[in-house]
């Protein structure tokens, strides 16, 4: 089973989450990072500091700059956002 992974600038993983959950798991906010959803069939919901969330499809990644902060992650067994 793959994981949704947080990586630092050099590309070193700093956190991994692999369990499907019904609620958000807390994430330590960081100033700049890349989130990679390496799961093949599951989406990852990312909760932002303002309470909104975004959905990261399977095998997709995104980069967050200083303006955004992720405060939680929820991995869902859904295959689409």
Image (cartoon, rainbow, N blue to C red):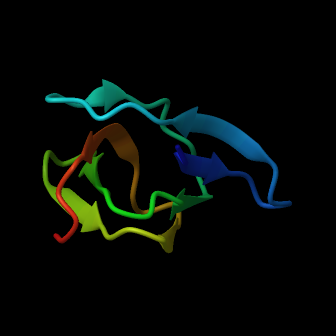
Rendering quarter of residue 13: top right
Q: From this view, report whether residue 3 is shown above or below residue 68.
A: above
- Please indicate whether residue 16 sits to the left or right of residue 11 in the image: left
> What residue is rendered at 18% in x and 48% in y?
50
Q: How many marks?
A: 0
Residue 51 point in image, percent of width and height: 14, 45
Q: Quadrant of residue 14?
A: top right
49 displayed left or right of 6: left
| Residue nearest the observer in this picture, 74 or 50 | 74
Image position, residue 28 (x, y; %) = 49, 30
Position of 78 compared to 12: left or right? Answer: left
* Image spot of residue 77 (x, y percent): 22, 49
Of the pair 68 and 47, the residue shown nearer to us: 47
Q: Position of residue 57 (x, y in %)?
A: 32, 70
On the picture, is 58 further left or further right than 59?
left
Q: Which residue lies furthest to the right in this view?
A: 10
Locate the C terminus by quadrant. Answer: bottom left
Q: Which residue is drawn at 81% across and 50% down?
A: 12
Residue plotted at (61% across, 57% down): 33
């Amino acid at each position: 089973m793959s994981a949704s992974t947080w990586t630092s600038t050099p590309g070193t993983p700093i956190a991994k989450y692999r369990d499907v959950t019904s609620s958000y798991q807390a994430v330590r906010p960081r100033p700049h990072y890349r989130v990679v959803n390496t799961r093949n069939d599951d989406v990852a919901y990312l909760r932002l500091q303002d309470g909104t969330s975004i959905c990261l499809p399977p095998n997709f990644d995104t980069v967050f700059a200083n303006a955004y902060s992720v405060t939680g992650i929820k991995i869902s067994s859904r295959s689409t956002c």
